[in-house]
Amino acid sequence: MSETKPQWVPVGDGPEARRIAVRDRPGTEPRVLWLGGFMSDMKGTKAVALDEWGAKTGRAVTRFDYSGHGESEGRFEDGTITKWLDEAEAVFSTFCPGPTILVGSSMGGWISLLLARRLREKGAADRLAGMVLIAPAADFTETLMWANFPEEARQSILKDGVWYRPSPYGEDPYPITRELIEDGRQNLLYETAPIETGCPVHILQGVLDDDVPWTHVTDLVSRLARDDVVLTLVKDGDHRLSRPQDIERMIAAVETVAD
């Protein structure tokens, strides 16, 4: 299978200007737009598997990296939910002129829901054909991070503007900035009910997920009261849901929504 070459979408002006790397595979609609997670990129297992499925089936698949991630420009420390949402909207506007399925993993699930809200506000909700959300971490900066941080971490964020959080995956610690936390509070969804997407939603969630508890996701389902929602709980699944059987579930969910 041939790898698609990166294309670039400009976002922002002046010191906020950055170029977002996009890999686009043309094909039939509805197009699939991958939205990755916090500290992940479009060359991760699930994103690549989705692209390979697109190549085999002729389905259009678009992937991109948020600023500070993967091939895109910018520093991770400068990222916020609003900035990454702006980038997702720019990629959507550029590459998704027709019906599109959003596939959002972890933070990408939150970004997907926020993007759906923006599209509804702009009268463009009909461009969403559906969503597949994998361990969606809506509001994670507040309810999953800040609420559970030790006091020394909170003080470091408030006084120094950053705390370096140890990675649970054995990787280098990553910075959690005050700007990320404060901006996250401007994008909270659980404080508004119901959450409306205007399209069918299929959620895949691991019961053994230590990063996004399954109860956090059932709370989300209760807020999607006006949408057609399917929740699949994977009893032995962790946060990444990247095993072969998990990939099969993701692809099956996308195919069901597409049909």
Image (spheres, rainbow, N blue to C red):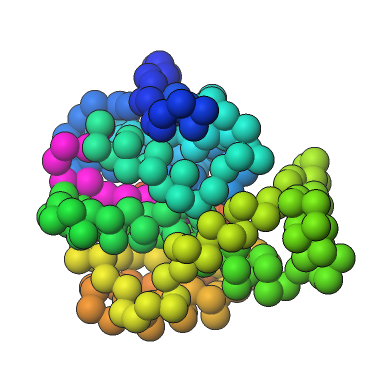
Tell me, yes or no, whether the highlighted magenta stretch contains residue 102: yes
Residue visible at 54% across and 80% down in the picture: 215
Which quarter of the figure is the C terminus placed in? bottom left
Which quarter of the figure is the N terminus placed in? top left
Count all numbered tags in the image, as a single digit. 0
Q: Nearer the viewer, residue 93 or 98?
A: 93
Image coordinates for residue 156, horizontal then vertical, percent: 82, 58
**Residue sticking out furthest to the right:** 152
Height in image: 208 above or below 56? below
Left or right: 163, with 211 as reference point: right
Height in image: 77 above or below 213? above
Image coordinates for residue 153, horizontal then vertical, percent: 81, 62
Image coordinates for residue 34, horizontal then vertical, percent: 39, 43
Residue visible at 52% across and 34% down in the picture: 67
Residue visible at 46% across and 26% down in the picture: 14
Q: Quadrant of residue 196?
A: bottom left
Q: Quadrant of residue 70?
A: top right
Height in image: 119 above or below 153? above
Any part of residue 214 in sight: yes
Residue visible at 83% across and 71% down in the picture: 151
Magenta part of the protein: which range? Answer: 95-105
Left or right: 82, with 149 as reference point: left
Q: Nearer the viewer, residue 107 or 159?
A: 159
Left or right: 126, with 193 as reference point: left
Q: Quadrant of residue 117?
A: bottom left
Q: Nearer the viewer, residue 33 or 185?
A: 185
Any part of residue 4 in sight: no
Image coordinates for residue 113, horizontal then vertical, percent: 36, 60
Left or right: 119, with 18 as reference point: left
Tell me, yes or no, whether the highlighted magenta stretch contains residue 258: no
